[in-house]
Image: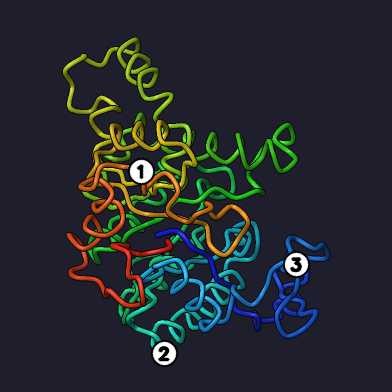
Amino acid sequence: MHTHAVDPGLPDLGRRYSRDRWPSVERTDEKTGWLNYGDRRYRQIDHRCWSPDARMADMDRDGVAMQVISPIPVTFCYEADPAGAAELAAAQNDFFARLVAEHPTRFAALGAIALQDPDLAVSELRRCMGRPGFLGVEIATQVRGYELADEQFDRFFAVAHELGALVLVHPRDEDLPTRMAGLAMGFGAGMPIETATAAAALLTSGALVRRPAVRLCLAHGAGALPAIIGRLDKGVQIGGMAADSAELPSRLAGSLWCDSLTYNRTALLSATEVVGADHVVFGSDYPFPAVPDPIDHIVAGLPAGLKDQISRTNLERIYGALPRTGPHALSAAGGDG
């Protein structure tokens, strides 16, 4: 449930929406390029970001049956003009739809939306979920400083529930504080803390009570949420909530999902305790350097039943049987993602 892709032909929005920063792909040769954000180079990328053949070669090598592809968070552009962001989201989703249509047994997708305008987001969500192979959408942990728990997003989440869409919550570099600048701090601490903050707001605000059964998946093993869940419980109890309340954060957390991308067995097992072993799916961050090496590191050492749940059967319980394609065909639901 957690891999990334980008259309090398992203629309040039800078001319019509010149006051905003937009992503673009600058090709340096057939197989490499830069993903730019506004006038700065954001990260170096290669053809695995856009070439299904390159991705499938890696999948076959690693024994991955299927990938669920999703946007790179810098392309969300929540600070930009909503109309331009919606146009960008639609273009990305068209690209994902082409990959899925060409290789329906190897790829599924999570789409992009312009969540700074919930009405536009709902419209694009409906368009995504009407297309073959789309399981849901990917969003950030906050939108222009507003928590996902904010009531302005209630309709979006209601429609996500109506359509059976999974919503992957992924932190963005742009939302991290200055003190989290730098790769080690941002990647290692900033992103998991940002995810946990978004989750904490959802768990303590009443948002999950207003939005029962919405399928929310927290990236990176739910971030730092497992480490703070006890404090969240104590915090709401200090505020007057009964210890046996059904709205205790640790009880509401059982409605959340997360991926397996923790790089640590203890952290992964902690995540399974918080959201439940039946709510964890395999994640890799492919094709970026954060991919575990080997790809099933940590997951491979789990008890067989738990490994199968994370790698395949948890998703199959929602979406039905998934393909088992490739020379090795690991039991890998959403495979690399």
Check disc 1 and report the residue beneath it: 301
Check disc 3 and report the residue beneath it: 36
**Secondary-structure class at tag 2:** helix
Q: Nearer the viewer, mark 1 or mark 2?
A: 1
Q: Quadrant of residue 157?
A: bottom left
Between the residue at mark 1 and the residue at mark 2, the CA separation in whole angstroms equals 34 Å
Q: In this orientation, which residue lies closer to the viewer: 13 or 103?
A: 103
Labels 2 & 3 near each other (Cβ < 8 A): no
Between the residue at mark 2 and the residue at mark 3, the CA separation in whole angstroms equals 27 Å
Q: In this orientation, which residue lies closer to the viewer: 285 or 229?
A: 285
Instruction: Identify the residue at horizontal 36%, vertical 49% (top origin).
Output: 300
Residue 284 position in % (x across, y down):
48, 56
Residue 57 position in % (x across, y down):
50, 78
Q: Quadrant of residue 167?
A: bottom left
Say whether residue 207 is left or right of residue 146: left
Image position of 229 with respect to 126: above or below = above
Instruction: Identify the residue at horizontal 30%, vertical 13% (top origin).
Output: 237
Image position of 179 with respect to 219: above or below = above
Between the residue at mark 3 and the residue at mark 1, the CA separation in whole angstroms equals 38 Å
Labels 1 & 2 near each other (Cβ < 8 A): no
In the image, what residue type sits under mark 3? Answer: Asn
In the image, what residue type sits under mark 2? Answer: Glu
Say whether residue 23 is left or right of residue 3: right
